[in-house]
Amino acid sequence: MTEDHAVSTDNGPDHAICAKEIFGVDLSSSVPAFKNKTAFVPDIDKDYDFDPLTTRSILLGVQHNKRVLIHGPHGTGKSTHIEQVAARLNWPCLRINLDGHLTRSDLIGRDAITLQDGQQVTSFKDGLLTYAIKRPFILVLDEYDAGRPEVMFVIQRLLEDEGKLTIVEKNEIVKPHPFFRIFATSNTIGMGDLTGLYHGTQYINQGQMDRWSLTVSLDYLPPEKEAHIILSKTPELNTKEGIETIKQIVNLASMIRSAFKADEIMNVISLRALINWAQNIVLYDDIALAFCVSYLNRQDQTDQDKIKEFYQRCFGEDIMLKSAA
C-alpha cells in the first residue's frame, strides 16, 4: 500500500487576523486566514450574530487543527456559524450533508470511464471527502448524526490526531493537507433522538464521538438578538408598527419553546421559521395568514390549539387556520 504525501500544490493561509477585531472574541494569538477569496469561500452575511463560545471553539479548531462538533436544535445556525467564520477568513469551505443516500463511494471516489486521446480509459475519480482533504479546506459534515454506519466508519480514522484516509480501491493512504480542517453539526449528541423531532438520526459509535476534540452546544439566540436578525432580513418592517410585530413574533417563539421544554407541545419553532414568517407578512400583508403558512399549518391539531392560545396572548386576537389559497 502506498502513501500519498504530495496531496496538493495549493498553498496554505497567507494572512492572519485578530479574532477580537473581527469576531469579538479573545484568543492568545492571531488566526490564520487567506488574503484572496475563491469560489469555495462562502459569502459574508454582514448581519450574522456570532455566539462567543461557539465562535471561539471554531477559531481554535482552525488554529490548532482540532475536530469540532456543534450540536443543538434545528434552526440555531450551527452550519451557518462555521460558514460565516470561514467567510471572514476567506477559507475555502465544503459542506456535505450526511443524508441516508450518501454512500462510501460518494465520499471516497469510484472508478469512472473517461476519454483520453479518443480511447475509453478507466480511472479513479476522487469523491467529496478525498477531494477536500487534499486541499486547505474547511469540511463541514452536516447532519452528522444521520450518517449511515458504513459511511461513518470511513470518517473515523480521519478524526484521529495525524489521521489519514485509506483508499482501498487504489491501495493508497492519503495524508490530509496541513491546513485541512474538519467540523460537524448534529441535532443530537450521538445517543439517538428521544424527542421524536429528528427521525433518521442514528446512535453514533462512542469511540468515534471521543475523537471529536471539542463539542459545543448551540441554542437559540436571546430574544433581542433574534428580533434584530429578523428585522435585518425584513427591512420592510422597519416601522413603529413593524418593530412591534417583530417583538410579538419573538415573544410567541419564546412561549412555544418553553412549552416544548415542558413537554406541552411536540415541536419548537426555529429562527429560520421566524424569518419566513416575517417575510411572509410582507408578501401577504396579513400577520395571521403569514403565521399559518409559515408554521401553524404543519403542526398537530393538539399543538395547534395550544399555539393558538399563545398567538392570542401575543397579538390580542384569535387565529383561524388559513391557507394561501
Image (tube, helix red, strand yellow):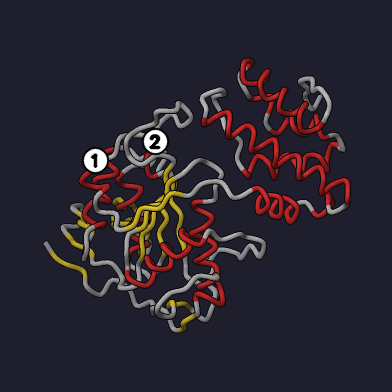
Q: Measured along the vertical axis of the image, is residue 275 above or below residue 289?
A: below
Residue 257, position in %: x, y? Answer: 58, 34
Residue type marked 2? Gly
| Res 100 label | 2
Please name the residue shown 54% across and 67% down the image.
87
Please name the residue shown 44% across and 83% down the image.
14
> 148 or 107, which lies in front?
148
Q: Measured along the vertical axis of the image, is residue 265 above or below residue 280?
A: above
How many numbered discs?
Answer: 2
Q: Secondary structure at mark 1?
A: loop
Question: Where is residue 318, by image quadrant?
Answer: top right
Q: Mark 1 — residue?
A: 205
> 134 or 31, which lies in front?
31
Residue 262, position in %: x, y? Answer: 52, 27
Residue 126, position in %: x, y? Answer: 33, 58
Question: Where is residue 127, by image quadrant?
Answer: bottom left
Indicate which disc, 2 or 1, sits on the residue closer to the N terminus: 2
Please name the residue shown 56% across and 44% down the image.
75
